[in-house]
Structures are given as structure tokens and as C-alpha cells.
Image (tube, rainbow, N blue to C red):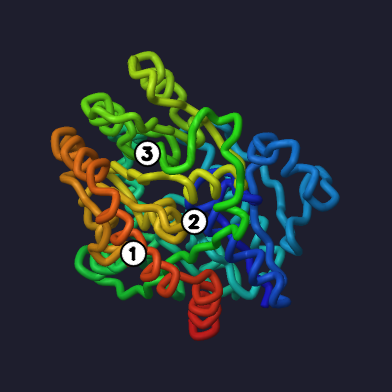
């Protein structure tokens, strides 16, 4: 089949759950023999590390190849509120002349343009909802209203609607009267992770607590910094992840942090990421908003004990297994950290159980199979 993906910033993935999802799925579909096109924003290519750029196929002004996937570079208006929608409109118009068998839209905002191929082409239109984007703190009141309004086209125009969690499935059924199919992401574990050296990072195996995610308010890093500063321990706290989307928030975290046990690593490449998961004493996800938290899955899959906020998305991801605290409550997070740090045996047993569950439940190959079946029957 000839399939296009629209709505992501681009691939190869550097940050972001949607980019990770698109990278893993599109490259697997291409390896199976399908003709896959992923649309990318112009600025995304500039953000790639030199090592990543060196692995790309021949780059022209509009195209390059990544693991047999054709990546089409399309411009956008590079402002906070117009970047995504302007890019999606141009991609949708470009898709009309490409005659794809299926056009896959990702996320609520981009899926507002799903009417274009639905009304003006014979392509099957597929929408994948990753989260309720209007809940994200980075959006102002007007943007939140527009994103909520975008739920209408995401509901009514696609031939087939996917959501990545049962919680989103319930939401669309109850609020929008639309049935959907759950399409959970998979996981991929680097076999070199446990053996990767942490030399040069200032941390030792099993002697640090890890926050690894995008550095933005909704991920709750500020809760963790506050709680960790109240705990007496020789462990370090490692804060890692991309901070480009909310630089002011990251600068404030750095400015307000007085605890010398806390290390800010910024963006880390894939091999270091697997090492951080594999060697951490505990992974913490204190988020207020999620779709289906990929980092929580990855940490558990690497055998790292997990502590997460008790929002429904986090709890459903691991079927209530793992360790949780009351979301947004620094006192609750502090007590959970104290318990974890003083009960390594119980934490290890819990991690083994959760890791087994995740590795047997989540698979990118299964994700691809469900997506293809949905397209075929749309």
C-alpha cells in the first residue's frame, strides 16, 4: 500500500511521542514492502544532530530517505500557533496529487484537516489520537478552544479512528458518540543498554533517580525537584530530556534549583537514553497530562522500577502495577520517594513483575498489524 503520515514534526525521532510513534511504525511498514511517505517540517531537519543527519539518505530541498521511508519536507509558518496547522494544510494539499491509498493523520489539531482528502480524493482517511491536546498547559485559552473544536472533524471525517488508550476510547464514545479502536504503541529495547557506560555523566549505576522526558510544565518536573530536595539520600537526581519547546520553564527550573545532588543533562542520544533507564534506581514520571506515556513503558521494559502520578493514563498503561503518588501533590511524591529509597528489595520485585507485563503486552509489530488491518477494512 501507498501510505502517507501527516501531523508529526518529522523523522528520525529526536523527541516527542508522536515522532517516536511515527518513526517506529513507518520504518517497519516500509521494511514490509509498503511505500511510505512521512511529511516533515522544514525546521525539523535543522534540529537533527550531526550524527543523525549523516545516516540519512540523499537530501534534496524537499526529500530524503530514512530506513526506506520517503520523508517529504514541507514548509510552515514557524510560529507557536501557526506552525502545525499551516504545515498540515500544505501537506494535505500535496497529498491530493500523490494518490495515496491511505492518509494517516496524527493528533487532534492536524486531524482537523482530514476533510481535505476525505472530500477531494479517494484515499482512505485514518486518524490516530494520541492525547487530548487542549489539556496541555502550553496552550492559551483561544488555542484550547480551537483544539476542542478540532475534535469534530477528527471524529466525523476519518474512515477509521484510532486512539492509543482505552481512556481516549471512552472519551470519544461518551463525548463524541464515535467508536474507535485502540492502537497502543510498542517498545524497543536496546540490548546494549545495561552495558553502556555512564562514565562522564557524574552518576553511578543504581545510585540515581531518573526523570527522562520532555521538559515542560505538564510533565511535572517541578514537583519532582521540590520533593527530591526534601529527601535525605546519597542518590542523585538526573533530569534528562529535550527542553526546546518550553525554554523559559527549563531556565526557571535551573535558576531555582539549589540542590547540588541534581544533575541536568538536557537532550540525550538514544544509546545514552537506554543506559540511563537500565542503570537507574528509580524512574519517576510526575506528569499532570498524558496520552499513553511512552517513557513509562520504556523504563519498565528496561527493568527500571517506576513511580508515577496517579492520573488515569499512567495507571492504565501499567494496569495499576508499579508505584504511584497523588498527582500534583508534592507531599505525596515526597513520601513515595522516601518509601522507594528505603525499600530497594520491594522495589526490585515490583520492577521485575511490571517489566514482564510490559514486554509481553506492548509490541511495535502488533501496532503495525492493527494499523494495517484498520486501513484494509476502512
Q: Secondary structure at mark 2?
A: loop
Question: In the rendered structure, which disc, 3 or 1, sits on the residue that comes first in sequence?
Answer: 3
Taking depth in this image into account, of 317 and 300 the one nearest to the observer is: 300
Q: Which residue is mark 2?
A: 113
How far, Cα to Cα, is label 1 from label 2? Answer: 39 Å
Q: State the residue in front, 378 or 93.
A: 378
Measuring from the top left, give residue 324's x and y in whole percent: 22, 51
Seen in the picture, residue 191 relative to 330 is either above or below; the reply is: below
Mark 3, residues whose alpha carbon is within 10 Å: few (<14), some, or many (≥20)?
many
In the structure shown, which secondary structural element does the residue marked by tag 1 occupy?
A: helix
- The residue that disc 1 covers is 354
Q: Is residue 238 visible?
A: yes
The tag earlier along the polypeptide, 1 or 2, is: 2
Give the mark nearest the N terminus, 3 or 2.
2
Residue name at image x 36 percent, y 70 percent: 357
Q: Is residue 113 left or right of residue 325?
A: right
Question: Residue 286 at x, y = what percent?
Answer: 29, 42
> Is 264 situated above or below 107?
above
User: Residue beneath label 3, please?
Assistant: 209
| Whole-percent x, y for residue 117 in the image | 56, 65
Left or right, residue 326 beside residue 322: left
Question: Mark 3 against mark 2, which lies toward the viewer?
Answer: 3
For the question of whether residue 145 can be seen, the reply is: no
In the displayed structure image, the side of residue 121 where residue 330 appears, left or right: left
Mark pair 3, 2: CA separation: 42 Å
User: Neighbour class for label 2 at 10 Å: few (<14), some, many (≥20)?
Assistant: many
Which quadrant is the N terminus positioned in? Answer: bottom right
Q: Nearer the viewer, residue 281 or 64?
A: 281
Q: Secondary structure at mark 3?
A: strand
Q: Which image quadrant is residue 253 in?
A: top left
Q: Quadrant of residue 121?
A: bottom right
Amino acid at each position: 500500500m501507498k501510505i502517507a503520515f501527516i501531523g508529526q514534526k518529522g523523522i528520525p525521532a529526536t523527541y516527542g511521542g508522536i515522532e517516536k510513534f511515527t518513526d517506529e511504525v513507518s520504518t517497519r511498514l516500509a521494511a514490509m514492502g509498503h511505500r511510505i511517505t512521512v511529511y516533515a517540517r522544514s525546521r525539523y531537519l535543522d534540529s537533527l544532530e550531526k550524527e543523525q543527519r549523516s545516516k540519512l539518505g540523499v537530501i534534496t530541498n524537499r526529500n530524503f530517505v530514512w530506513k526506506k521511508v520517503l520523508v517529504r519536507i514541507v514548509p510552515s509558518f514557524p510560529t507557536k500557533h501557526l506552525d502545525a496547522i499551516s504545515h498540515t494544510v500544505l501537506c494535505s494539499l500535496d497529498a491530493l496529487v500523490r494518490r495515496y491509498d491511505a492518509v494517516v493523520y496524527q493528533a487532534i489539531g492536524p486531524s482537523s484537516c482530514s476533510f481535505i482528502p476525505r472530500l477531494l480524493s479517494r484515499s482512505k482517511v485514518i486518524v490516530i489520537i494520541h492525547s487530548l491536546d487542549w489539556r496541555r498547559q502550553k496552550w492559551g485559552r483561544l488555542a484550547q478552544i480551537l483544539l476542542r473544536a478540532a475534535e469534530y472533524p477528527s471524529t466525523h471525517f476519518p474512515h477509521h479512528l484510532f486512539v492509543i488508550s482505552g481512556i481516549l476510547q471512552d472519551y470519544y464514545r461518551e463525548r463524541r458518540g464515535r467508536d474507535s479502536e485502540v492502537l497502543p504503541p510498542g517498545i524497543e529495547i536496546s540490548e546494549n543498554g545495561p552495558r553502556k557506560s555512564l562514565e562522564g555523566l557524574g552518576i553511578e549505576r543504581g545510585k540515581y533517580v531518573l526523570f527522562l522526558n520532555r521538559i515542560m510544565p505538564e510533565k511535572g518536573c517541578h514537583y519532582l525537584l521540590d520533593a527530591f530536595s526534601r529527601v535525605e539520600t546519597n542518590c542523585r537526581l538526573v533530569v534528562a530530556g529535550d527542553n526546546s519547546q518550553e525554554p523559559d520553564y527549563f531556565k526557571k527550573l535551573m535558576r531555582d534549583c539549589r540542590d547540588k545532588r541534581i544533575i541536568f543533562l538536557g537532550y540525550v542520544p538514544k544509546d545514552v537514553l537506554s543506559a540511563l533507564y537500565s542503570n537507574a534506581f528509580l524512574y519517576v514520571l510526575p506528569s499532570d497530562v498524558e496520552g499513553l506515556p511512552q517513557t513509562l513503558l520504556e523504563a519498565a521494559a528496561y527493568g527500571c522500577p517506576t513511580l508515577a502520578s496517579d492520573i488515569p493514563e499512567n495507571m492504565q498503561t501499567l494496569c495499576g502495577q508499579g508505584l504511584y503518588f497523588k498527582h500534583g501533590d508534592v507531599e505525596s511524591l515526597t513520601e513515595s520517594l522516601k518509601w522507594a529509597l528505603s525499600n530497594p528489595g520491594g522495589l526490585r520485585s515490583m520492577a521485575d513483575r511490571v517489566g514482564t507485563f510490559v514486554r509481553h503486552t506492548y509490541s511495535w509489530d502488533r501496532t503495525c498489524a492493527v494499523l494495517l488491518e484498520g486501513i484494509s477494512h476502512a
